[in-house]
Image: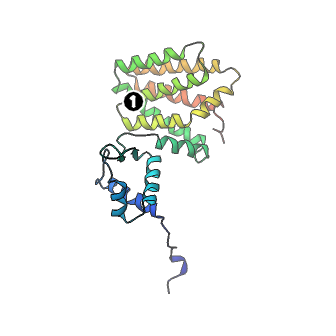
Amino acid sequence: MVAAEAWEPVQRVRTYEQVMQQIEERILDGRLKAGDKLPSERDLSASLGVSRPSLREALRVLEALGIVEIRPGGGQEGGAVLVGTPGPGFVNLLKLQLALGHFSQTNVLETRIALESWSCQEAAYRSDSDDADELAAILDRMDDPSITTKEFNRLDTTFHVRIAESTGNALIAHLMGSLRIAINRQMIEAYAALPDWRETAKTVRHEHRGILHALRERDAVGAVERVRNHITSFYAEGNVGGIHS
């Protein structure tokens, strides 16, 4: 006789989850691709044998995840269309996961180092003079003596994301942007907690200039070393709470 522990309880799957699963399967096996429009709500609910409210619930979840876009109206312009470019779904999910403490500050630090080290290494080889000029312009705006902590952090994020973009790897750039947006609140709070955030900002600006100089010189090793030190020193000084926990 088979032992009781070998059996697994039957899982009840809600209708909208089954709808999502079918759409996901068609995306993964190539039957649906970016830009494709799903059948009308009436036709799709009939084909799937589900109620229209259940279909709408599935589409709302997929829309929140950034998989489909629900366009108002009927005819050719309206309906559910598979999104062709990365949307805010991943960013929103990551922000919530971080806010709930599912990833520690150490996880964030290590991920930043991995992404930004690769980005600087490749940017040293792949970026061009236009990329360098845009990075320099960002740093010039960060030198504004009247700049606020919020704007300083926004430009800080823009600088690091722009390096990732200069590699030509769209996925890396999107991951970098998503991570920085997700930790935006923590970064602003870290600056706000400093006795004199402008003194720390001087160090940050100096380190940014060093990274840019290494990129202009095609010094991949130097660029990686500078960005690693730039990130770890900010965390190690306790600017972002919880890194040692």
Q: Nearer the viewer, residue 56 or 96?
A: 56
Instruction: Give amino acid for label 1.
Output: Glu
Q: Nearer the viewer, residue 107 or 27?
A: 27
Please state the horizontal and vertical placement of residue 41, each as a whole percent of the image: 37, 55
Horizontal side of 4 relative to 136 (left or right) equals right
Comparing 13 with 50, the one in front is 50
Quick one: which residue is furthest to the bottom in this view?
1
**Is disc 1 surrounded by few (<14), some (14 to 19) or many (20+) residues within 10 Å?**
many
Q: Residue at x 55, y 39 (%)?
A: 108
The residue singled out by tag 1 in the image is 165
Point 50% across, 21% down: residue: 208
Q: Residue at x 61, y 46 (%)?
A: 101
**In the orientation shown, which residue stands out farthest toward the front?**
74
Q: Secondary structure at mark 1?
A: helix
**What colouring method underlies this structural image?**
rainbow
Left or right placement of residue 128 versus residue 187 in this view: left
Find residue 77 and report its image quarter: top left
Q: Is residue 44 above or below residue 170?
A: below
Query: Residue 222 sits in which quadrant?
Result: top left
